[in-house]
Image (tube, rainbow, N blue to C red):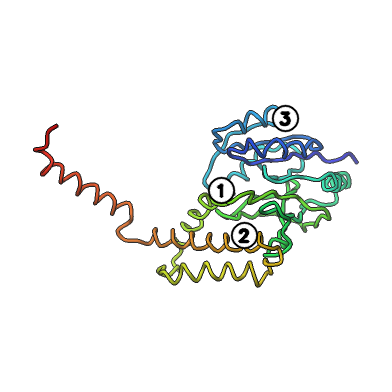
Amino acid sequence: MSRAKLTAVIIAKNEEKMLPACLETLTWCDELLLIDCASTDQTAQIADTYGARVIGFDHYSFAKIREKALESVTTDYLFYIDADERVTPALAKEILVHLEKQDCQVMEIIRENICYGRKFAYGNWQNDRVLRVFHRDNLKGWQGEIHESPIYSGQPCLLTYPLIHLTHRSTKDNLFKSAQWTIKEASLIAASKETKKVTFLTILRKGIMEFYRRAFKFKGYKDGLAGLIEALVQGINRMLVYIQVWELQEKPSLEDRYHKQEMQVKKLWQTEGSTLKL
């Protein structure tokens, strides 16, 4: 039996700094596919120099982007990987063994998270498992606007060796990611009929409870100051989500209120300002 072929799929936007090192850990894959989400830097060009097939496709739903990749793959298997993730030789060999045996149609991988330059063993980061390798026939699609999950058939096999995740590389990096995903989560929460009116206490409680869970319930403090800082960042993120839920709940909307202010200033210029001359 010949080894099944595999395509590594990278979904990226403006990842010119992280992408080259990621691609260098994928030389064992049969094909490389980059789904470029409207990058304005050299992401697409870099992927091309590494021999990747580049498809431009941007969508607010990560599930739709992952499904676009599924539609575009021609090999039997596909492996989703992010630009800030790294495959070790041991993990590559393990995947190749399964491809040779063709004994596993869905592969689950433990993800080793490096936050603020340190491997996190607590704070709920230690429980990070991701479904990333699929036989094309077993992957039916993806669901969820945020933290999307695969729709698949078959029983996943858990691999031994981890995928290295170089995330939260700085406070600036954290804030940039927060700006991207917190508004999406806030929109989903605000749209739910079960969501109650957000108050200041709601915002405060959400942040404190998230910090408590990360820092103490899941023992993030054992990761040192970096663990406590990451727990605090996660608490701040929860507050940012609910601050934006509050924004979306406001009637009239904030946009309408600012428009009203603009019209008032415009009216002043039409009346009081009409006699002013330089």
In the rendered view, does 159 fall on the left or right side of 199? right
Image quarter for residue 211? bottom right
Look at discs 1 and 3 and give the one toward the viewer. Answer: 1
Q: Amino acid at mark 3?
A: Tyr
Secondary structure beneath disc 3? loop
**Location of residue 4 in the rendering, given as x and y in whole percent from the top left corner:** 83, 41
Sooner in the amino-acid sequence: mark 2 or mark 3:
3
Report the residue at 64% width, 68% height from top: 215
Q: Is residue 236 above or below residue 77?
A: below
Quarter placement of the N terminus: top right
Q: CA distance from mark 1 to mark 3?
A: 29 Å
Image quarter for residue 21? top right
Residue that mark 3 sits on: 50
Report the residue at 55% width, 64% height from top: 235
- Foreground residue, 38 or 229? 229
> Residue farthest to the left?
275
Q: CA distance from mark 1 to mark 2?
A: 13 Å
**Location of residue 103 in the rendering, given as x and y in whole percent from the top left corner:** 85, 51
In the rendered view, does 127 fall on the left or right side of 4? left
Secondary structure beneath disc 2? helix
Q: CA distance from mark 2 to mark 3?
A: 34 Å
Badge 2: residue crowd in 10 Å (few <14, some 14–19, many ≥20): many
Q: Please say if the residues under marks 1 and 3 sit with CB atoms less than 8 Å apart.
A: no
Sooner in the amino-acid sequence: mark 1 or mark 3:
3
Q: Amino acid at mark 1?
A: Lys
Disc marking residue 172:
1
Residue that mark 2 sits on: 230
Q: Is residue 4 above or below residue 202?
A: above
Secondary structure beneath disc 1? helix
